[in-house]
Image: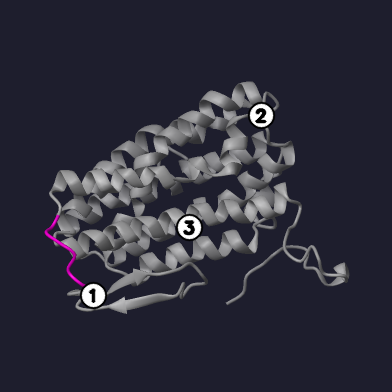
Amino acid sequence: MPDAVRVTSLGNEDFAATSVSESEKDRPVTGEPWSREEFEALLRAKGGLYHIHHPYHRAMYAGELSREQIQGWVANRYYYQIQIPVKDAAIMANCPDQSVRQHWIQRILDHDGHEGDRGGIEAWLQLGEAVGLAREEVRDLRHVLPGVRFAVDAYVSFARRVSWQEAACSSLTEMFAPEIHQSRLDSWPDNYPWIDAEGLAYFRKRLSEARRDVEHGLQITLDHFQTRAQQEHGLDILQFKLNILWSMLDAMTMAYVHDTPPFHSCPDKSALPQRLVSVG
């Protein structure tokens, strides 16, 4: 069995993770395993920490964000969107179960597209155009903040390094996604009438896809995490993913709400790069 990874904090691609054996011998037994129903309830309770509650999103739904703040969110979130199929490909690469791969591959097709469906990435580019961004400035990632990039890269690295069941567990933030998509569909037309309604197709598309994906990911998680220590580890994994999503919005808040983007306090602005690129 592959080693598990216990996530302790968020950083770069190493993200301060500590490898532990599958038996998790260094983790004390804390009690009897929860029933499937109890474990699922605890996983779902993590929705109280979902990024729908972040001040950036609260301001978004209240109609309090400026055009530039909406555009910054769309441009940065695009980096997350294009890494989703990369993350899912990593899960498939680590999974020896053909039936699981046959099911999981639909997630890649949902984002990359296939015959008859141009996919979620294309839908996000259309959202970018709807909020006034040129397609090329979204695609070339010129607006992506280092904090967003580090958070997303940590997520992809996690999916590559851990067992496929652990990576599948991290996807369970999708349990909370339909609400956040619906809240955008409900609030944006009234609060941001300058946004072309055709650009909201991504959110409509994900309403049904997320619900379908949750059923599969939840079944994998409930089947795999059997002991109490494993179940607690599963909760830690889901918390790690919640940390990722929250940290992305923290970076955007600094840049677009507090007007303190990276290097804002450096006296010599001539050294600033034209875009905040990543190397390595």
Q: Amino acid at mark 1?
A: Pro
In front: 27, or 89? 27
Residue depicted at 65% across the width and 25% down the height: 191
Query: Which label is found at residue 244?
Result: 3
User: What residue appears at the point 17 percent right and 61 percent down from the top-left corner?
Assistant: 228
Residue 116 can be seen, yes or no:
no
Relative side of 162 to 198, left or right:
left
Residue 89 appears at what percent x and percent y? 36, 60
Residue under the point 69% across and 42% down: 69
Main SS of the magenta part reads loop
Q: How is the image coloured?
A: one colour
The residue carrying pointer 1 sits among few (fewer than 14), some (14 to 19) or many (20 or more) residues within 10 Å by Cα, namely few
Image quadrant in which the C terminus is located: bottom right
Q: Nearer the viewer, mark 3 or mark 2?
A: 3
Inter-mark Cα distance, 2 to 1: 47 Å
Q: Which residue is mark 2?
A: 195
The local crowd at label 2, few if under 14, some if 14 to 19, many if 20 or more residues have their Cα within 10 Å, is many
Residue 193 in percent (x, y) is at 67, 23
Task: Name the residue type under label 2.
Answer: Ile
User: Vertically, is 6 above or below 259?
Assistant: below
Q: Which mark is residue 2?
A: 1
- Quadrant hosting residue 254: bottom right
The verdict on residue 226 being magenta is no
Q: Nearer the viewer, residue 71 or 37?
A: 37
Quadrant position of residue 279: bottom right
- Residues in magenta? 28-33
| SS at mark 1 in the image | loop
Q: Determine whether the residue tagged by mark 3 lies in a helix, strand or loop.
A: helix
| CB atoms of marks 3 and 2 within 8 Å | no
